[in-house]
């Protein structure tokens, strides 16, 4: 009797539990295939529209295929990937940036050389993702590091931009002092949520002073930060910082807020930023974009005295996509990458995101409300020599952390002397 | 339809407490499986990882105490994080407990507007640390933050600071934000304990002309000893693992001045261009052992040998 009642109780429990579990399982049809994609840039409507368009395009081309894009912010995306991939899970296709070489060395992403149509990709952009002769990511977003300025404020200071749009380092320092004296914030910049914008001025100056080869050596541990040329640059940056270049809330100002600070409230003379500036600035004003009549201009970063390459400029690849080595749908994943990389999509990227791209796009003239901007951006690229990659693409581990704490925040934040900055960077990065 | 004997039999059949092991397992299994999967396994795995280097593609290499040696002997950021966490824990625990008790006493003594104050002091407890962090980042903003604006309004503009931007003030600013959020919790716990105190004892003390300070030290505090002990342990554990508020407000900066052990574990695990969870696991394990040891010591120290009867 007791055994019978136990069985009845078990059966009752099963009846309660099983339907509950079964109810959570979706009905699966054999012909349905879902391609899982994880992407950053949920807060940039033009990029969301771009990738969703490619997804719908792939779905139309393959009946029974569904592309599900999960939108993330950057840090949660990478935290999710770093736990999902070692477990053999994760999406089929995901967003990645070229500094994340650990995904390659760990074997979590596959070479795309034979999977993707590379005829639609700029060779220089492909090279950024090429390691040991194999290409691991498809470059979508390309950008240059630019120095944006407010034309009206520059005029108000009585300063004229040189014909080559580049001040000397002394003129730039003088400009910062003039702006501060006039009650303006000279440079809108903040490091509240990113490990790199505070270093823009310093690293662009280092690139021009050292030239591409020594610049690369510096951030790969082969050149000391105590090199006299590096120290000269840091001393100049220190003068700029001490002249009150940055806002007082530099340490907590977030990337998006620094844009708003620049073009709306309280306003600033300069904003060093990647040309992905447009993603935040060219949205409607009520969504945080710049006012329609904002007098935006672009100048070159200042030339350095005895600079080895004053026409050098940082260009790099940002948003890219890779295919999970554990994906069961690699070919379909590659087709999604191809769908995002046609010349038509490249044209759409430029015309809607207002940003350079690694996709070959035949755009001879620009139209639309921001055509003037894009024309000026292209004008600033004439005669420039590009250094492909940023310091954060080259440094890892302790050096990367120290770069974020020292060159990105502590030094431009006025918390460190030149000697302290040199000592800390050398300790973490220099292998000589 | 049923006689009383029949009703008794039906009662026996549906009483789960009298069921066999199978019935118990059937009801316990869902909770046990979830607990094993989401708590026990991650903890065991963290211990396992701490003694290994986790290489790509599932390759695991035994390194013994290598990770522990490296972090104890050659990692200055770890020691900075330990110092910050210890300071934060010590100060926050003292302020949490002492401050909570003071606020509770204030309400217990029926201060003017006590019901309103109770709501005001307790409301921040209902907010998440992320919301509190964002709120206080705004308040501490140099240009438009309430903190500096208040100082300027009071004519104390010379004292305005980049509160979160200076290594000398950043940790204290985060601590202040934490206290704003958490004091109300301890206050409510103390208030409940105060209301449970025997009125005769407090009344007798008053008849003996016992002053309020003497009453607090010699009458109330000893009777609240268990509550104080529990809150100290809870507060201590919470502060030793502080992460979210620091992460939202400073991210461990400037210059590692607010780096805590938890933020450092996260950075080593997810922001160092590596999939090796061995080293961060070693930090987590070491910290777990330290917390366990401290909790054991504090609990033993606060153990009440002579139980008060009231």
Image (spheres, rainbow, N blue to C red):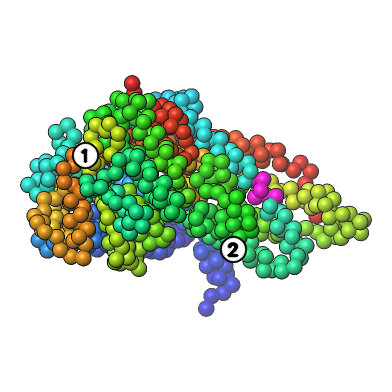
The image position of residue B177, as x and y in percent, is 57, 53
The image position of residue A375, as x and y in percent, is 17, 56
Q: Is residue B193 above or below residue A118?
A: below
Name the residue carrying label 2. B123
The chain to which mark 2 is attached is B
Do the numbered discs 2 and 1 sit on residues whose CB atoms are within 8 Å? no
Q: Residues within 10 Å of mark 1 (few under 14, many from 20)?
A: many
The chain to which mark 1 is attached is A
- Quarter of the image for the C terminus of chain A: give it: top left
Q: In which quadrant of the rendered view does residue B122 lie? A: bottom right
The residue shown at (29%, 61%) is A295
Q: Can you name the residue that lies furthest to the front here?
A: A158
The image position of residue A55, as x and y in percent, is 18, 59
Label of residue A185 in the image: none
Q: Is residue B26 above or below residue A12?
A: above
Q: In which quadrant of the rendered view does residue A133 lie? A: top left
Left or right: A170 in relation to B243: left
Q: Which of the two residues, A344 or A17, is positioned nearer the viewer here?
A: A344
The residue shown at (16%, 46%) is A382
- Magenta stretch, main secondary structure, is helix
The residue shown at (23%, 29%) is A213
Is residue A92 among what the camera can see? no
**Circle 2 — which element?**
helix
Q: Can you name the residue that lies furthest to the left here?
A: A119
Magenta part of the protein: which range? B93-98
The image position of residue A234, as x and y in percent, is 38, 34
- For discs 2 and 1, the disc positioned in front in the rendered view: 1
Name the residue carrying label 1. A311
Left or right: A293 in relation to A412: left
Q: Which of the two residues, A336 or B297, is positioned nearer the viewer here?
A: A336
Determine the CA span between mark 2 and mark 1.
57 Å
């Amino acid at each position: 009797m007791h055994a019978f009642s136990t069985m009845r109780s078990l059966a009752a429990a099963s009846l309660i539990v099983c339907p509950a579990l079964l109810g959570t399982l979706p009905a699966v049809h054999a012909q349905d295939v879902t391609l899982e994609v994880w992407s950053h840039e949920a807060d940039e409507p033009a990029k969301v529209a771009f990738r969703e368009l490619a997804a719908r395009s792939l779905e139309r081309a393959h009946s029974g295929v569904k592309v599900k894009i999960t939108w993330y912010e950057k840090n949660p995306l990478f935290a999710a990937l770093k736990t999902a991939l070692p477990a053999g899970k994760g999406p089929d296709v995901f967003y990645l940036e070229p500094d994340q070489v650990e995904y390659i060395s760990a074997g979590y992403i596959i070479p795309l050389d034979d999977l993707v149509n590379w005829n639609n990709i700029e060779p220089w952009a492909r090279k950024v993702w090429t390691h040991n002769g194999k290409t691991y990511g498809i470059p979508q977003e390309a950008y240059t590091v630019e120095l944006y300025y407010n034309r009206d404020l520059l005029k108000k200071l009585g300063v004229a931009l040189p014909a080559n749009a580049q001040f000397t380092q002394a003129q730039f320092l003088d400009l910062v002092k003039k702006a501060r004296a006039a009650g303006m914030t000279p440079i809108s910049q903040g490091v509240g949520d990113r490990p790199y914008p505070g270093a823009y001025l310093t690293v662009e100056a280092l690139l021009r002073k050292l030239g591409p080869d020594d610049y690369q050596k510096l951030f790969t541990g082969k050149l000391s930060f105590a090199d006299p040329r590096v120290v000269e640059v840091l001393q100049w940056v220190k003068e700029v910082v001490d002249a009150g270049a940055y806002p007082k809330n530099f340490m907590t100002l977030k990337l998006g807020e620094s844009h708003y600070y620049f073009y709306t409230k309280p306003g600033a003379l300069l904003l060093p930023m990647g040309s992905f500036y447009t993603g935040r600035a060219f949205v409607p004003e009520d969504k945080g974009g710049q006012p329609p009549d904002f007098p935006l201009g672009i100048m070159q970063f200042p030339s350095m005295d005895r600079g080895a390459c004053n026409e050098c400029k940082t260009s790099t690849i940002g948003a890219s996509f890779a295919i999970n080595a554990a994906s069961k749908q690699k070919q379909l994943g590659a087709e999604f990458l191809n769908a995002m990389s046609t010349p038509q999509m490249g044209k759409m990227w430029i015309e809607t995101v207002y940003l350079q791209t690694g996709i070959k796009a035949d755009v001879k003239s620009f139209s639309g409300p921001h055509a003037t901007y894009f024309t000026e951006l292209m004008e600033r690229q004439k005669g420039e020599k590009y250094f492909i990659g940023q310091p954060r693409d080259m440094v890892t581990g302790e050096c990367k952390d120290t770069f974020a704490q020292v060159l990105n925040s502590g030094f431009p934040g006025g918390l460190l002397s030149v000697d302290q900055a040199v000592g800390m960077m050398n300790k973490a990065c220099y292998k000589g | 339809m049923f006689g009383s004997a029949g009703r008794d039999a039906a009662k026996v059949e549906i009483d789960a407490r009298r069921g066999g092991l199978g019935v118990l397992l059937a009801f316990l299994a869902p909770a046990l499986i979830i607990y094993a999967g989401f708590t026990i396994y991650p903890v065991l795995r963290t211990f396992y990882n701490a003694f290994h280097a986790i290489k790509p593609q599932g390759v695991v290499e035994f390194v013994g105490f290598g990770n522990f040696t490296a972090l104890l002997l050659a990692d200055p950021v770890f020691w900075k994080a330990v110092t910050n966490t210890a300071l934060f824990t010590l100060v926050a625990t003292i302020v949490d407990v002492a401050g909570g008790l003071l606020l509770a006493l204030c309400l217990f003594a029926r201060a003017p507007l006590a019901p309103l104050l109770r709501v005001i002091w307790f409301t921040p407890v209902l907010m998440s640390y992320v919301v509190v962090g964002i709120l206080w980042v705004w308040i501490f903003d140099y240009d438009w933050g309430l903190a500096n604006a208040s100082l300027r309004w009071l004519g104390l503009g010379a004292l305005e600071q980049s509160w979160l931007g200076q290594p000398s003030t950043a940790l204290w600013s985060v601590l202040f934000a934490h206290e704003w959020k958490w004091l109300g919790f301890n206050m409510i716990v103390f208030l409940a304990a105060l209301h449970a105190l025997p009125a005769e004892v407090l009344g007798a003390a008053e008849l003996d002309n016992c002053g309020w300070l003497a009453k607090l030290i010699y009458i109330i505090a000893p009777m609240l000893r268990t509550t104080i002990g529990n809150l100290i342990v809870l507060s201590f554990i919470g502060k030793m693992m502080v992460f979210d508020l620091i992460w939202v407000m400073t991210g461990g900066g400037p210059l590692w001045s607010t780096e805590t052990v938890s933020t450092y574990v996260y950075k080593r695990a997810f922001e160092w261009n590596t999939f090796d969870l061995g080293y961060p696991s070693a930090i987590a394990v070491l910290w777990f052992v330290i917390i366990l040891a401290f909790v054991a010591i504090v609990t033993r120290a606060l153990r009440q040998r002579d139980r008060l009867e009231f």
